[in-house]
Amino acid sequence: MELTAFHELTQEISSECFFMTESQQEEKVIQLIDLHHFVECFDPKIKILSYLHHPINIIEQQGNTIGILFCDMKHSAVPDSNASEEFRRRYGLSELWFVFVEETFVPDTAGYADTIIENSLDIFYEKIFSFNFFQSIIHPLK
């Protein structure tokens, strides 16, 4: 993401999310960075529709409206999948994707498999990925 575009988007977060604490705004900026970098790596033709008012980002890919939820296991717990399903219905999403964001390479995906099973992620999400942010590597897990 270019610095100018990043600056414009962070300004948008500051003005649109004025009710959020500084920490919540920082989390929203991280969500935005994860989203833009994921799209750049996965399919630059994806159109970003919404990211401000919910942890689930809404994108459009090949005519399908999709929700993407990012989760960094080092900094937060896995969100409630029932809330994601409700979000899907409310916004008429055709799919939900779950993305584990990692800062360092994780060669053993067993930890992800355990988390997927424990939280029934494979039931709620059509696609599940691991995304190494700094190496720009996306691995499909489902």
Image: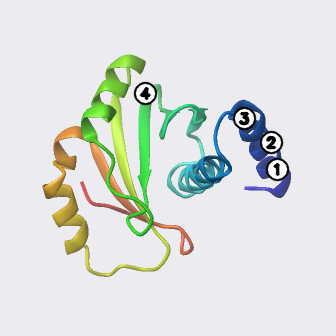
Identified by mark 3, the residue type is Phe
The C terminus - image quarter: bottom left
- The answer to which of marks 4 and 1 sits earlier in the sequence is 1
As helix, strand or loop, the secondary structure at mark 2 comes to helix
As helix, strand or loop, the secondary structure at mark 3 comes to loop
The percent position of residue 75, horizontal first and vertical second, equals: 45, 65
- The answer to which of marks 2 and 3 sits earlier in the sequence is 2
Identified by mark 2, the residue type is Gln
Q: Is residue 71 left or right of residue 37?
A: left
Residue at left offset 59%, top offset 35%: 47
Q: Calculate the distance from the C-alpha at mark 2 to the C-alpha at mark 3.
A: 10 Å
Pointers 4 and 3 in contact (C-beta within 8 Å): no
Residue at left offset 31%, top offset 25%: 86
Residue marked by disc 3: 18
Residue at left offset 79%, top offset 56%: 2
As helix, strand or loop, the secondary structure at mark 1 comes to helix
Identified by mark 1, the residue type is His
The N terminus - image quarter: bottom right
Classify mark 2: residues with Cα within 10 Å, few (<14), some (14-19) or many (20+).
few
Furthest toward the right, the residue is 4
The percent position of residue 108, horizontal first and vertical second, equals: 26, 80
Classify mark 4: residues with Cα within 10 Å, few (<14), some (14-19) or many (20+).
few
Q: Calculate the distance from the C-alpha at mark 2 to the C-alpha at mark 1.
A: 6 Å
Residue marked by disc 4: 64
Residue marked by disc 2: 11
Q: Which of labels 2 and 3 is toward the front?
A: 3
Q: Calculate the distance from the C-alpha at mark 2 to the C-alpha at mark 4.
A: 29 Å
Task: State the residue in front, 75 or 56.
Answer: 75
Residue 100 vertical placement versus 18 (above, below): below
Identified by mark 4, the residue type is Asn
- The answer to which of marks 2 and 4 sits earlier in the sequence is 2
Residue marked by disc 1: 7
